[in-house]
Amino acid sequence: QKEVEQDPGPLSVPEGAIVSLNCTYSNSAFQYFMWYRQYSRKGPELLMYTYSSGNKEDGRFTAQVDKSSKYISLFIRDSQPSDSATYLCAMSGETSGSRLTFGEGTQLTVNP
Amino acid sequence: GAVVSQHPSWVICKSGTSVKIECRSLDFQATTMFWYRQFPKQSLMLMATSNEGSKATYEQGVEKDKFLINHASLTLSTLTVTSAHPEDSSFYICTVGRPDTQYFGPGTRLTVL
C-alpha cells in the first residue's frame, strides 16, 4: 500500500465549477502538507502549505487537513481554464524541509 | 517563494556520454537539496538528497555511481548522469529544502539518443 493515495483522474470540469482534490495517507507522522501545481513540461509550483490540521485559504484556493481521518483536500473556487494542470499533494514528517512523499497527482482540465 | 534555477533546461546527448545538470538556489543558502526524476504522466520519484559538504544520500534502487551528486556550496548542487543510456531519458528536477517547505526548480529534460 502506498503511503499517500491520490486519484490520478483525469478530472474534467466546466469553467466556474468548484473543484475538489483529495489525498489520503497512512503515516501518522506526517505533519506538513503541501499542494503543488505542475503544468506540462514544467517543474511543480508550490500552491498551498499547511502545518497540522485545519484550513488555509489563499484567494480561490482552500486547503484542508483532517489528521484524524488522514485526509487532505484542495478546493478551487471559480475554476479557470488556466487552472488546467496536474495537482500533486505532498507531505513530510518532522521538518517540512525534509523529504517529501508525493501523491500520484491528479490531472485537471477546466473547459471554457 | 524561493527562486531555484536549473541549467540546462533541456539537453540531447548520445548514448554513452555524461551530462551534468546544475541546480542553483538564488535567494537562499540551502544545506539540503533534493533530486527527483519524473517520467511522462507519472509522479515524482526522489532519487537522492544532496547535503552541502558531505556525501549525498541515495534512495533505494538509485545507482550512486551512475548519478553523481555534488553539493559543493550552499547555492549549488550538480547531478551528473554518467554514461547515459536511452532509459535515462527523463525530466530531472531539483528542489531546495527550506524550513517551511521545498521549492522546485524548473526542471531539465534529458533525451539520450
Image (tube, coloured by chain):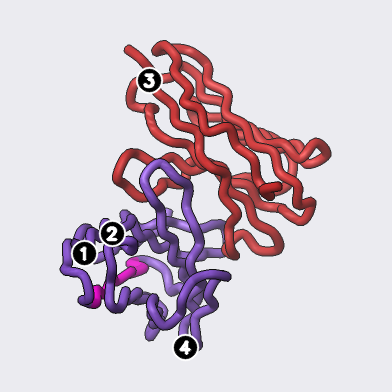
Chain colours: A red, B purple
Label 4 or label 2, whichever lies nearer to me, is: 2
Type of the residue with mark 2: Thr
Q: Are marks 1 and 4 in contact (CB under 8 Å)?
A: no
Tell me the element at label 3. Answer: loop
Determine the CA span between mark 3 and mark 1.
32 Å
Label 2 or label 3, whichever lies nearer to me, is: 2
Residue matched to label 3: A80
Classify residue B18 as left or right of residue B58. Answer: left
Q: Is residue A10 above or below residue B44?
A: above
Residue A112: x percent and y percent?
32, 12
Determine the CA span between mark 2 and mark 3.
28 Å
Dividing the picture into quadrants, the one containing residue A23 is top right
Specify start and end residues of the magenta stretch as a single range: B18-26
Residue matched to label 4: B53
Residue matched to label 2: B108
Q: Are marks 4 and 3 in contact (CB under 8 Å)?
A: no
Q: Is residue B82 above or below residue B28?
A: below
Query: How many numbered callouts?
Result: 4
Tell me the element at label 2. Answer: strand
Type of the residue with mark 1: Pro
Q: Is residue B25 magenta?
A: yes
Q: Which mark is residue B97?
A: none
Type of the residue with mark 3: Gln
Residue matched to label 1: B8
* Depth check, front residue: B58 or A60: B58
Q: Residues within 10 Å of mark 1 (few under 14, many from 20)?
A: some
Classify residue B52 as left or right of residue A94. Answer: left
